[in-house]
Image: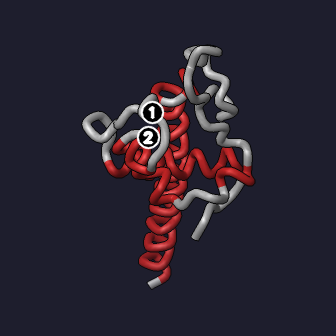
Amino acid sequence: MLKITRTLLAGAAILAAGLVSVGTAQAADAEQLYQFYCTQCHGPGGKGDGPNVTPSMPVTPRNFTKQEDMNKLTDADLFNVIMDGGPSISKSAIMPPWSKTLTKEETDALVAHIRKLCACKGKQ
Protein backbone atom coordinates (compact mmCIF):
# COMPACT_ATOMS: atom_id res chain seq x y z
CA MET A 1 0.00 0.00 0.00
CA LEU A 2 2.81 2.44 0.86
CA LYS A 3 4.56 1.67 -2.42
CA ILE A 4 1.35 2.36 -4.39
CA THR A 5 0.81 5.65 -2.54
CA ARG A 6 4.39 6.78 -3.28
CA THR A 7 3.93 5.85 -6.93
CA LEU A 8 0.66 7.80 -7.12
CA LEU A 9 2.24 10.81 -5.42
CA ALA A 10 5.22 10.69 -7.76
CA GLY A 11 2.89 10.47 -10.74
CA ALA A 12 0.83 13.40 -9.46
CA ALA A 13 4.00 15.46 -9.02
CA ILE A 14 5.10 14.68 -12.58
CA LEU A 15 1.63 15.58 -13.89
CA ALA A 16 1.61 18.85 -11.92
CA ALA A 17 5.06 19.74 -13.23
CA GLY A 18 3.85 19.03 -16.74
CA LEU A 19 0.86 21.32 -16.29
CA VAL A 20 3.10 24.12 -15.06
CA SER A 21 5.34 23.60 -18.06
CA VAL A 22 2.36 23.70 -20.41
CA GLY A 23 1.18 26.98 -18.85
CA THR A 24 4.65 28.44 -19.18
CA ALA A 25 4.90 27.20 -22.76
CA GLN A 26 1.55 28.81 -23.59
CA ALA A 27 2.75 32.13 -22.14
CA ALA A 28 5.95 31.87 -24.17
CA ASP A 29 3.95 31.02 -27.28
CA ALA A 30 1.69 34.06 -26.72
CA GLU A 31 4.76 36.28 -26.39
CA GLN A 32 6.21 34.83 -29.61
CA LEU A 33 2.91 35.27 -31.43
CA TYR A 34 2.70 38.86 -30.24
CA GLN A 35 6.29 39.58 -31.28
CA PHE A 36 5.72 38.07 -34.73
CA TYR A 37 2.26 39.42 -35.60
CA CYS A 38 1.70 42.51 -33.48
CA THR A 39 5.01 44.23 -32.71
CA GLN A 40 5.39 45.80 -36.14
CA CYS A 41 2.51 48.18 -35.37
CA HIS A 42 1.77 47.93 -31.67
CA GLY A 43 5.42 47.88 -30.59
CA PRO A 44 7.32 45.40 -28.43
CA GLY A 45 5.84 46.81 -25.22
CA GLY A 46 2.38 47.40 -26.69
CA LYS A 47 2.60 51.21 -26.74
CA GLY A 48 1.52 51.59 -30.38
CA ASP A 49 5.04 52.57 -31.39
CA GLY A 50 6.10 49.74 -33.69
CA PRO A 51 8.57 50.19 -36.54
CA ASN A 52 5.80 50.25 -39.18
CA VAL A 53 4.10 53.26 -37.56
CA THR A 54 4.48 56.45 -39.58
CA PRO A 55 3.16 59.99 -39.09
CA SER A 56 1.17 59.57 -42.31
CA MET A 57 -0.97 56.76 -40.87
CA PRO A 58 -4.59 57.92 -40.64
CA VAL A 59 -4.96 56.15 -37.28
CA THR A 60 -2.20 55.21 -34.87
CA PRO A 61 -2.16 51.65 -33.53
CA ARG A 62 -3.77 51.14 -30.14
CA ASN A 63 -1.57 51.59 -27.10
CA PHE A 64 -2.24 48.43 -25.09
CA THR A 65 -0.65 49.90 -21.97
CA LYS A 66 -3.35 52.59 -21.54
CA GLN A 67 -5.61 50.97 -18.95
CA GLU A 68 -8.31 53.62 -19.31
CA ASP A 69 -8.77 52.79 -23.00
CA MET A 70 -8.24 49.05 -22.69
CA ASN A 71 -10.80 48.74 -19.87
CA LYS A 72 -13.47 49.90 -22.34
CA LEU A 73 -12.94 46.75 -24.43
CA THR A 74 -14.14 43.25 -23.64
CA ASP A 75 -12.04 40.19 -24.32
CA ALA A 76 -14.54 39.41 -27.09
CA ASP A 77 -13.78 42.81 -28.66
CA LEU A 78 -10.06 42.01 -28.64
CA PHE A 79 -10.66 38.51 -29.99
CA ASN A 80 -12.90 39.82 -32.78
CA VAL A 81 -10.52 42.57 -33.87
CA ILE A 82 -7.61 40.11 -34.00
CA MET A 83 -9.60 37.56 -35.99
CA ASP A 84 -11.69 39.87 -38.20
CA GLY A 85 -9.73 43.13 -38.32
CA GLY A 86 -10.48 46.64 -37.13
CA PRO A 87 -13.74 47.13 -39.04
CA SER A 88 -15.30 44.24 -37.10
CA ILE A 89 -15.63 46.53 -34.09
CA SER A 90 -15.92 49.82 -36.04
CA LYS A 91 -12.20 50.53 -35.78
CA SER A 92 -9.46 51.16 -38.32
CA ALA A 93 -9.28 49.14 -41.53
CA ILE A 94 -5.50 49.25 -41.14
CA MET A 95 -5.80 46.50 -38.50
CA PRO A 96 -5.76 43.34 -40.63
CA PRO A 97 -7.82 40.20 -39.98
CA TRP A 98 -5.80 37.20 -38.82
CA SER A 99 -8.55 34.55 -38.91
CA LYS A 100 -6.95 32.72 -41.81
CA THR A 101 -3.59 32.67 -40.02
CA LEU A 102 -4.24 32.27 -36.28
CA THR A 103 -6.21 29.57 -34.50
CA LYS A 104 -8.82 30.26 -31.83
CA GLU A 105 -6.35 29.06 -29.19
CA GLU A 106 -3.59 31.34 -30.49
CA THR A 107 -6.00 34.28 -30.54
CA ASP A 108 -7.12 33.52 -26.98
CA ALA A 109 -3.44 33.49 -25.97
CA LEU A 110 -2.90 36.86 -27.65
CA VAL A 111 -5.90 38.34 -25.84
CA ALA A 112 -4.44 37.14 -22.53
CA HIS A 113 -1.05 38.59 -23.47
CA ILE A 114 -2.60 41.95 -24.37
CA ARG A 115 -4.37 41.95 -21.00
CA LYS A 116 -0.97 41.49 -19.36
CA LEU A 117 0.35 44.49 -21.27
CA CYS A 118 -2.46 46.69 -20.00
CA ALA A 119 -2.53 45.07 -16.56
CA CYS A 120 -6.32 45.23 -16.77
CA LYS A 121 -9.29 42.90 -17.13
CA GLY A 122 -11.35 45.00 -19.50
CA LYS A 123 -15.07 45.56 -19.68
CA GLN A 124 -17.03 42.59 -18.38
- Few, some or many residues within 10 Å of mark 2 (<14, 14–19, 20+): some
* Vertical comparison of 62 with 21: above or below: above
In the rendered view, does 62 fall on the left or right side of 16?
A: right
Residue 48 pos. (x, y %): 65, 30
Which quarter of the rendering shows the N terminus?
bottom left
Q: Residue at x 45, y 29 (%)?
A: 94
Q: Mark 2 sits on what residue?
A: 86
Is 2 or 84 nearer to us in this picture? 84
User: Marks 1 and 2: CB-CB under 8 Å?
Assistant: yes
> Extreme bottom residue here?
1
Is 44 or 80 nearer to us in this picture? 80
Residue 124 pos. (x, y %): 57, 70
Q: Residue at x 51, y 62 (%)?
A: 16
> Is label 1 in a helix, a strand or a loop?
loop
- Few, some or many residues within 10 Å of mark 1 (<14, 14–19, 20+): some
> Is label 2 in a helix, a strand or a loop?
helix
State the image quarter where residue 15 is shown: bottom left
Q: Mark 1 sits on what residue?
A: 95
Is 63 or 5 nearer to us in this picture? 63
Q: Residue at x 48, y 55 (%)?
A: 77
Q: Amino acid at mark 2?
A: Gly
